[in-house]
């Protein structure tokens, strides 16, 4: 327990400046805040609306927690929202996976070092870091999926408790089995209540696939009448409240349009079936190659065996295939599979810790970090000398200072590999990544100008109030989200078609900078007018007459 607590405390400390100083992104975070504010003002707590348009995309759990946090803090707090809804679920996932596999990963020579390395592998995987610091429902749903599958694993292993529960005996094992039998549908429901249909499909399909692969066809024993009764009652209560709050049309949107229609023939984020195969390489970075090598070796040498390893492997394969078959795809959707990918690989680490190919994959990561340090440092020096007008992110210190930890981490990792301390090599790389994030996040105030629209929106608001101008946008899907910064002054951004742009006067017009400037008519219209970049690829032009 102390080991896990120290890891989490270290990661929390490294991410703390980022959670405190980061501003909200335009695409999703500002939309969620607008929806929460609208729900509080209108009193709709089951049917949500975004600028009067029904928003049935997401269930209410995330929004409810955000409402409570606003009540506690008196305003929307980036730190509280990120910590409670993203980072804390990430820690719970790591804690469960570590507890689930700790016994298997213990080594006579290295002790708990492989468990520590496995936790660091998951925490430092790129998609997991992104999910832990940005406001999205995916980490919350993933936590409940992991909890539901861990609960099933305990039930499946508790053969004695299952027999005694059936015979109505009051032993510890029987009570544990009965408790897990109720917790399983509860966790599945909470996964649905966090994000939607994937929260149901992922754990249920994974359990079925595992049981079939283990040649145990007693699916009804674990997904029996108690499971379905609890799940259906909870869902029925939720859907009933949705019907009372939003009506038949909203309920139909929630149950069919946002699930079946989106899954079969997506109207949003439609990608090819190979999307996750191609995006895996950055999603699991820097451990993408190491994961594949370890998993292949584990299957080849039959080390992925037994209830624990087979269930974890079946889970990542099932989720990966299921999500690849669904029409709507973005990278963050793969987050529920990532803990199981990493731990399928980690479970074979004690067997292959000194394998040459495995050490080569870790050494490759270390070398890439060294190359990244050298190339970034020289690039920043060359740009400063020969192209001073180029827009590179302004950091609080020279680039080499901020990136120094990854160089140190790479060197320490190579030394650990040479000393036959493979788990220490992995932990050194992961720790150096988090220290680099910490040093980089100390420049968050200046980085916000490039990455988030707040400062530009505040500038536009002051100009609009000073000159009495209106706010408008063209070809900017996130325009309504930016209203978060204007609504306290009773202003909003009017969305225009192209033909409505040219007659504009006394207007501040928001555009997606690169896309709008590719349009010859818009480019000519904007020429000669003052243009201000707001960050996140958005700009506005000031139209005086």
Image (cartoon, rainbow, N blue to C red):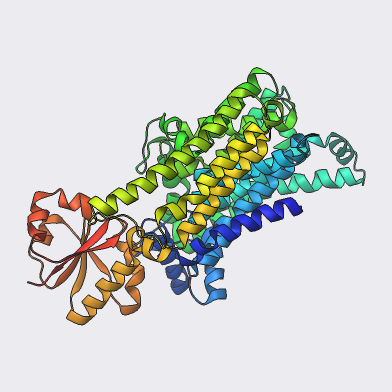
At x 40%, y 66%, the residue is 445
- The correct choice, above or below, for 316 with respect to 527 in the image is above
**In the image, farthest residue toward the bottom:** 466
Residue 80 visible, this angle: yes
Residue 391 percent across, percent down from the top left: 27, 55
Q: Position of residue 84 (x, y in %)?
A: 58, 61
Q: How many marks?
A: 0
Give the left or right position of residue 451, taking residue 111 as reference. left
The image quarter in which residue 268 lies: top left
Is residue 229 visible in this depiction of the protein?
no
Q: Quadrant of residue 314?
A: top right
- Please identify the quadrant where the C terminus is shown: bottom left
The picture places residue 261, in percent across and down from the top left corner, at 40, 40
* Residue 194 x, y percent position in the rendering: 55, 53
Q: Please indicate whether residue 543 sits to the left or right of residue 273 in the image.
A: left
310, 416: nearer the viewer: 416
For the residue pair 257 and 428, the one nearer the viewer reads as 428
Decide: is 11 above or below 321: below
The answer to which of 253 and 369 lies nearer the viewer is 369
**Quarter of the image holding residue 174?**
top right
């Amino acid at each position: 327990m102390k080991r896990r607590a120290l890891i989490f405390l270290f990661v929390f400390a490294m991410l703390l400046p980022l959670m405190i100083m980061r501003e909200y992104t335009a695409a999703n975070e500002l939309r969620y805040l607008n929806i929460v504010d609208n729900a509080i003002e209108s009193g709709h707590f089951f049917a949500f609306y975004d600028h009067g348009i029904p928003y049935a995309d997401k269930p209410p759990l995330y929004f409810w927690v955000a409402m409570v946090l606003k009540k506690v803090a008196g305003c929307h707090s980036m730190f509280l929202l990120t910590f409670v809804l993203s980072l804390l679920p990430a820690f719970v996932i790591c804690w469960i996976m570590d507890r689930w596999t700790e016994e298997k990963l213990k080594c006579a020579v290295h002790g708990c070092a492989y468990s520590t390395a496995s936790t660091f592998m998951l925490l430092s995987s790129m998609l997991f870091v992104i999910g832990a610091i940005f406001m999205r429902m995916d980490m919350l749903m993933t936590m409940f999926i992991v909890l539901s599958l861990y609960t099933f694993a305990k039930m499946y292993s508790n053969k004695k408790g299952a027999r005694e529960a059936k015979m109505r005996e009051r032993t510890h094992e029987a009570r544990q089995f009965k408790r897990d039998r109720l917790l399983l549908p509860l966790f599945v429901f909470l996964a649905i209540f966090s994000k939607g249909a994937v929260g149901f499909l992922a754990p249920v399909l994974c359990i079925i696939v595992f049981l079939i692969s283990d040649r145990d066809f007693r699916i009804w024993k674990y997904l029996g009448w108690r499971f379905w009764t609890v799940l259906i009652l909870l869902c029925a209560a939720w859907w009933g409240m949705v019907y009372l709050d939003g009506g038949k049309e909203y309920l139909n949107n929630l149950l069919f349009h946002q699930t079946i229609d989106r899954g079969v023939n997506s109207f949003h984020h439609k990608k090819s079936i190979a999307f996750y195969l191609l995006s895996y390489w950055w999603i699991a970075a820097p451990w993408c190659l190491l994961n594949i090598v370890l998993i292949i070796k584990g299957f080849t040498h039959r080390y992925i065996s037994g209830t624990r390893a087979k269930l974890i492997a079946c889970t990542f394969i099932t989720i990966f295939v299921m999500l690849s078959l669904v029409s709507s795809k973005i990278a963050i959707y793969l987050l529920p599979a990532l803990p199981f990918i990493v731990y399928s690989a980690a479970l074979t680490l004690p067997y292959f810790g000194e394998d040459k190919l495995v050490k080569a994959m870790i050494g490759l990561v270390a070398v890439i970090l060294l190359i990244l340090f050298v190339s970034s440092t020289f690039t920043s020096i060359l740009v400063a000398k020969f192209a001073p007008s180029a827009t590179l992110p302004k950091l609080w210190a020279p680039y080499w200072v901020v990136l120094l930890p990854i160089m140190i981490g790479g060197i320490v990792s190579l030394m650990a590999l040479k000393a036959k301390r493979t788990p220490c090599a992995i932990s050194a790389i992961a720790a150096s990544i988090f220290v680099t994030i910490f040093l980089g996040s100390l420049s968050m105030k200046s980085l916000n100008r490039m990455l988030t629209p707040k400062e530009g929106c505040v500038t536009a608001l002051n100009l609009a109030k000073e000159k009495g101008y209106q706010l408008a946008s063209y070809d900017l899907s996130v325009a309504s989200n930016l209203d978060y910064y204007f609504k306290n002054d009773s202003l909003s951004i009017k969305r225009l078609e192209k033909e409505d742009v040219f007659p504009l006067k006394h207007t501040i017009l928001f555009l997606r900078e690169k896309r709008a400037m590719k349009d010859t008519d818009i480019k000519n219209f904007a020429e000669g007018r003052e243009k201000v970049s707001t960050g996140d690829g958005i700009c506005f032009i000031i139209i005086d007459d």
